[in-house]
Image (spheres, rainbow, N blue to C red):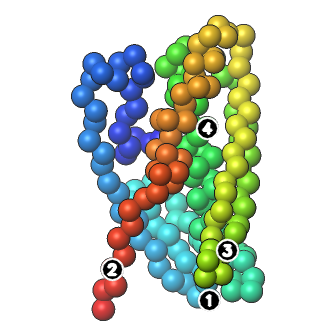
Amino acid sequence: MSADEPAASSPETATARKPMEPGHFTLTIDWIQDYEFRVKMDKEQFQEVLMDEPPPLGKDKAPNASRFLAAAVGNCLSASLLFCARKSRVEIVGVHTEVTVRYTRNEQGRIRIGKIDVQVEPRFAETDPARMQRCLEIFEDYCVVTQSVRKGIDISVSIKQ
């Protein structure tokens, strides 16, 4: 979840408010050398991010795209749980999330992400168990990244020459 994404409403107010139209953002990726790339985000306050592939292709100097996808899924789920807890006045004193990516090969033998396992470990202060349980039941539905990846994303690719 971020300020650029539509604000999630609580289930109680979802019908009372008109849903916010989603925004958009653009980032740039420039090749440095070998399989290293520099990613520039759309906001000046964001630092550039380096990406690289592990051997035998790259030198493993930075995370690759699979790791960023795993981080995006884990972060989004953690933030969604925190958002739900705060809206429900459930005090969270910590969140630890572990994401495991399992590779597989498709019918053509090409490597794909076959499964992403996420274990979210919230630490709650003493609170109303019913409100806490409600958050645990619905927070995934508010995670923009997880739900998008889970359902599949329409990706358009063009080559500019």
Task: Work out whether residue 52 can be spotted.
Answer: no
Nearer mark to the viewer, of 1 and 2: 2
Q: Name which quarter of the figure residue 51 lies in.
A: bottom right
Nearer mark to the viewer, of 3 and 2: 3
- The secondary element bearing badge 1 is classed as loop
x and y percent of residue 74 in the render? 63, 46
Query: Would you call the spot at circle 1 few (<14 residues within 10 Å), some (14-19), or many (20 or more)?
Result: few
Q: Which residue is mark 1?
A: 34
Mark carried by residue 158: 2
Query: Is residue 34 placed above or below 20 in the rendered structure?
Result: below
Task: Work out whether residue 21 can be spotted.
Answer: yes
Query: Would you call the spot at circle 2 few (<14 residues within 10 Å), some (14-19), or many (20 or more)?
Result: few
Q: At label 2, which amino acid type do we have?
A: Ser
Mark carried by residue 78: 4
Q: Which residue is mark 3?
A: 105
Nearer mark to the viewer, of 1 and 4: 4
x and y percent of residue 59 in the render? 72, 82
Nearer mark to the viewer, of 3 and 1: 3
Q: Mark 3 or mark 2, which has the lower sequence index?
A: 3
Q: At label 1, which amino acid type do we have?
A: Asp
Q: At label 4, which amino acid type do we have?
A: Ser
Q: Please give the name of the residue rendered at 49% of the width and 19% of the height, measured from the top-left corner.
A: 87
Q: Mark 3 or mark 4, which has the lower sequence index?
A: 4
Q: Quadrant of the C terminus?
A: bottom left
Nearer mark to the viewer, of 4 and 2: 2
Nearer mark to the viewer, of 3 and 4: 3
x and y percent of residue 134 in the render? 57, 18
Between residues 27 and 19, which one lies in front from this camera angle? Answer: 19
